[in-house]
Image (cartoon, grey):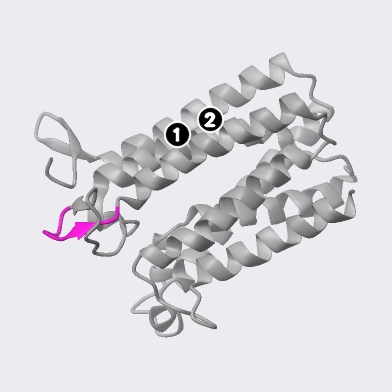
Amino acid sequence: MKFPINFHIGSVAIPSHSVFEILAFFFAFVFYFHLQKKQRDPLHFSNRESIILGGAIGALLFSRLLASLEDPASFFHPSSFLYYIQGKTIVGGILGAIIGVEITKKIIGEKRPSGDLFTYPLILGMIIGRIGCFLTGVSDRTVGIVSSVPWAFDQGDGLPRHPTSLYEIVFLGILWLVILGIERKWRLKPGVRFKLFVIGYLTFRIAIEFIKPLNPLILGLSAIQLASLIGAGYYIMFLYNTE
């Protein structure tokens, strides 16, 4: 297998990352609307629309801001303004969406939890998106560090590396099953399903970033790790306070 792997229409090469990013959004929204019809949405339709818009704006902005902080030297001395809008990261997208949603809810006066319905579609979209990251190889900048583990392999630069995108796909599948299992055993309060997802995923990202090329920002931690630590810590306190 030679990376990056692209799709071709005639002489035109279409990056696999772009293809799977589109597929991720498509199937996530299809699954979301399926669940919305199957489950009773506690929120009014107009409020739900506003929350989706607020979350999308927050995700768009913060995903790029956090990605630009991944290289502290370039963040403070960029070659051009384009540096701040070219990259994006899932952690920034999730945290930005949360911030955008909470601001929107304050504006429209919605106090009920709104994240539960998004949990499983979000996990599905992330799994599909990470397939695109994997097929893109080292140029996607999500690959792991050079390693001698038996399953490490060349992802486009001639060096055996941790397949971190595959690790994340497996973890997301396990997280999905774990949350489903918890819901079948206990009746969760509204909002807890989404909080469990955020805590689980952000904790995973803190750990896995140590086997990726790391650009420390503060205390030996990258911007993604610091943001994940803050986000996971906040929701752990939330769960503790609901006991």
| Residue 92 drawn above or below residue 20 | below
Near mark 2 (Cα within 10 A), the count class, few <14, some 14-19 or many ≥20, is: many
Indicate the amino acid at tag 2: Ala
Q: With 40 as the anchor, is 121 left or right in this view?
A: left
Q: Are marks 1 and 2 in contact (CB under 8 Å)?
A: yes
| Residue 229 drawn above or below residue 134 | below
Residue occupying the point 79% across, 40% down:
191
Q: Where is residue 136 in the image (x, y as percent from the top left)?
A: 25, 47
| Residue 12 drawn above or below residue 71 | above
Residue occupying the point 30% across, 45% down:
134
Residue occupying the point 90% across, 48% down:
243
Q: With 199 as the anchor, is 50 left or right in this view?
A: right
Q: Nearer the viewer, residue 83 or 185?
A: 185
Q: Position of residue 89 (x, y in %)?
A: 47, 56
Inspect the magenta stretch and tell me whether residue 160 lies in it: yes
Any mark on residue 234, and which?
A: none
Q: With 148 as the anchor, is 105 left or right in this view?
A: right
Any mark on residue 24, and which?
A: 1
Q: Can you identify the residue that label 2 sits on? A: 28
